């Protein structure tokens, strides 16, 4: 297939392109300087000229809590414009298949039960990233609406759980939980620090999936899109405590020091777990164990992040 991949330089895009299956396809991966997805006319012209068989829309304006709170207009408008332009341009050009990548931020806040696809728009969103979430919800709905109006189109949305893996951000100023743990424990190991601090009691639960497993799911979707639900979670369906992530990472890294807990520090939500039953019924489950995923991620960190310094 000829596949137009937006966001090719991000973690999801890079994991797709380095997957063993990628070599069987032709990839269109323009840089932002070559194609501004917020420009509808330019996006239409590009897609009409290239006529891809499939579009995977992985591009987006992303950032942490502070960035989302500081610039809600930017996170809403840029993600809305990019998604709208890609989907409408694809439909206009007659592109038959499109996979839109959503976010678990689309789900209501403070739900202890596993998040089902039907839960979207059933409750209040997390205020700190509401703009981003609203954009993701709107584009997922747009994909569904286009298919309702034009039966020849197969435009579906996948909702990944939290991801980690190769090409992650390890800088402590920007990193999420898993790369932050890897960075912290590696630094403790090489500097001889015998105690590593964990925020809170470490009992909060988190669902993190290896990014290579998402790549597997996206390739399956590219071949089996017609049988996939219009909106589907791609996740583990189970989670671990923050303490368990630290303990497994310490085993992988070879850190044998102690852990302490700072109970005065914020820990965020107690749990955000996706329901993976639809993905299992579709025939997909994540293949990487936590230890395997952490080992591959740490190897990438050592060879790429450390090796380039």
Image (cartoon, grey):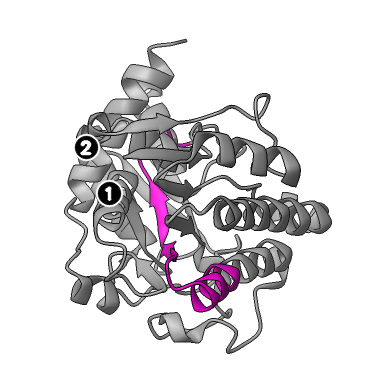
What residue is pinned by disc 1? Answer: 219
Residue 211: percent from left, percent from top? 34, 46
Identify the disc placed on residue 303: none
User: Residue at (51%, 61%) from the top-left corner?
Assistant: 102
Say if residue 99 shows up in the picture: yes
- Which type of secondary structure does the marked residue at label 1 adopt? helix
Asked whether the viewer can see residue 194, the reply is no
Q: Is residue 249 magenta?
A: no
Q: Nearer the viewer, residue 171 or 263?
A: 171
Image quarter in which the N terminus is found: top left
Q: Using residue 246 as the reference point, say whether residue 79 is left or right of it.
A: right
Residue that appears at 67% across and 64% down: 135
Quarter location, residue 267: bottom right
- Judging depth in this view, the residue of 129 and 88 nearest the camera is 88
Disc 2 target residue: 21
- Which of the 4 image quarters holds residue 189? top left
Task: List x then y, in percent, for residue 95.
Answer: 47, 52
Give the image quarter of residue 235: bottom left
Inter-mark Cα distance, 1 to 2: 8 Å
Of the two numbered discs 1 and 2 on the same chain, state the one appearing first in sequence. 2
Range of residues picked out in magenta: 140-168
| Spot occupied by residue 76 in the image (x, y as percentages of width and height) | 75, 59
- Is 8 left or right of 259, judged from the image as shown? right
């Amino acid at each position: 297939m000829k596949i137009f991949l937006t966001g090719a330089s991000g973690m999801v895009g890079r994991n797709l392109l380095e997957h063993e299956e990628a070599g069987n396809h032709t990839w269109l991966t323009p840089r932002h300087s070559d194609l501004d997805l917020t420009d509808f006319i330019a996006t239409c012209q590009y897609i009409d000229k290239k006529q891809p068989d499939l579009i995977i829309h992985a591009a987006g304006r992303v950032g942490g809590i502070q960035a989302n709170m500081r610039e809600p207009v930017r996170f809403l408008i840029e993600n809305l414009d990019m998604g709208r332009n890609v989907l409408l341009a694809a439909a206009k050009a007659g592109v038959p298949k499109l996979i839109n990548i959503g976010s678990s931020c689309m789900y209501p806040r403070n739900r202890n039960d596993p998040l089902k696809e039907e839960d979207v728009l059933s409750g209040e969103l997390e205020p700190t990233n509401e703009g981003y979430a609203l954009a993701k919800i709107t584009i997922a709905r747009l994909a569904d609406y286009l298919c309702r109006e034009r039966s020849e189109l197969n435009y579906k949305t996948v909702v990944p759980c939290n991801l980690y893996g190769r090409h992650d951000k390890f800088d402590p100023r920007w990193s999420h939980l898993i790369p932050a743990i890897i960075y912290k424990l590696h630094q403790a190991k090489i500097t001889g620090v015998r105690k590593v601090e964990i925020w809170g009691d470490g009992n909060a639960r988190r669902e993190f999936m290896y990014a290579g497993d998402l790549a597997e799911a996206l390739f399956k979707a590219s071949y089996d899109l017609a049988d996939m639900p219009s909106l589907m979670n791609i996740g583990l369906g189970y989670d671990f405590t923050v303490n368990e992530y630290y303990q497994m990472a310490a085993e992988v890294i070879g850190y044998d020091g102690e852990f302490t807990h700072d109970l005065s520090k914020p820990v965020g939500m107690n749990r955000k777990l996706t329901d993976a039953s639809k993905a299992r019924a579709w025939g997909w489950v994540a293949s990487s164990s936590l230890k395997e995923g952490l080992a591959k991620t740490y190897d990438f960190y050592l060879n790429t992040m450390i090796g380039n310094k």
